[in-house]
Image (cartoon, helix red, strand yellow):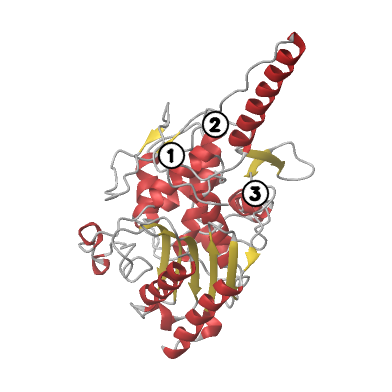
Amino acid sequence: MKYRTKSSSKLSEQKRERFSETFQIQIYAFATAIAVVVIYFYTVFTEKKPRPLVQTVKEPLVTVTEKPNLSTKPVPDSTITPKPSSSTSFYVPVYPNQNSQELAYNIINPSLFVPSQKLQEVVDDVVKFAKREQLPPQSLSITLIDVNSGEVASYQENELRYPASIAKLFWMTVLYSQLEANTDQNQGNINKDLKQMIRESNNDAASRILDRITETESGSQLDIKEFQHWLNKRQSVNRFFQIAGYGGIDISQKTFPILYLKLYEPKGRDLQMRGIPVKPLRNKMTTRQAATLMYEIVTGQAISDSASEQMERLLFRDLQPKAWQHIDPNMGDFNPVQAFFGEYLPKDTYFVSKAGWTNDSRQEVAFIRTSDDKSAYILAIFADSRDYAQHWTIFPKMSRLVYKRMTVINN
């Protein structure tokens, strides 16, 4: 699927042949012209295409007032539209014997990507680079998708790994589904929480959003019956994606610390859901799943075209140094560029990303498009190792390697 970067093409006016002298031929020619127009517009409006960079969204439900500085590619602010659509999601029963229902992700037929030897050589070079840096390749997973051609390459991409804050990308998707389906009647301070969760990777905001979309909250331990009911509701975010083919994904646990709850680690029912202390359950997903969701967002397929566009705007990162160099991670602020994919890329690159980082892991998924629009790709890398977590230039260098190779392939 080719990413649309400019305004849609207009229907060219074609010269019509002169009507023949007979009435029958005139009717036939007119009917033929109508049929051609109908077929054209049916093709245009039913084919799923990526959105243009600028699109007016009417009747916003929630508006993010702060506009990002997009340099040469301005994008309007993020909004959430309230209009429900039958195509945004569908319902599935929570239990076979219950009448209650919950939303599920609308991607019924996941995108099919074609393996590419050229892309595989790029991924292989990234793995070789990690080895040269004396980093463990067994802790690494990579997925690379060419958005223009639909080609893919990977390394251990189906390995379930801890996603850290990339889970917030998935929580945002569930939230948009609920908002468009009008299942969330209490909007509250969702605008601020969305901005903080996605742009700042704020755990407090993420905690409130996960509580909202699952109708649960953190607290003391529960008895068995109450806990099972609470756990089932919290795990609804897993089923939301699992029914769409995201097998094995688990995004039901919060990211810590959560300052407003004074939780610096899981306690109470959040700890209760982790199971045995020796090998506790944690969030998990694959790089293929992270890359696929990002692909579905930037190609307008996630929830709806409008919701996808709005999520993409929230995920946009300005690579101009003045936009990110002042953010100090040592002060507790999340810097989405420094030490991640965008740091060593050209400043005019269009960059949409969500990153995660812990003391023991480093993760990122990003959509990257060159300024000349010739190359557009998605890169997802998860590294479950302290060696990667403490290597502050490894992701920027890997990203630059991929960028250079992709520009060569697409030129």
Q: Measured along the vertical axis of the image, is residue 3 above or below residue 19?
A: below
Q: Which residue is mark 1?
A: 7
Labels 3, 2: front one? 2
- Give the amino acid at mark 3: His
Q: Position of residue 163 (x, y in %)?
A: 50, 66
Q: Dot 1: what SS?
A: loop
Q: Which residue is mark 3?
A: 229
Q: Dot 2: what SS?
A: loop
| Disc on the earlier residue, 3 or 1 | 1
| Disc on the earlier residue, 1 or 2 | 1
Q: For this view, does 123 lie left or right of residue 394? A: right
Q: Which residue is mark 2?
A: 182
- Give the amino acid at mark 2: Asn
Distance in Å between CA atoms under marks 3 and 1: 49 Å
Image point 55% across, 69% down: which residue? 143
Q: Position of residue 227 (x, y in %)?
A: 62, 54
Q: For this view, does 301 lie left or right of residue 344? A: right
Q: Measured along the vertical axis of the image, is residue 317 above or below residue 399?
A: above
Q: For this view, does 253 lie left or right of residue 315? A: right
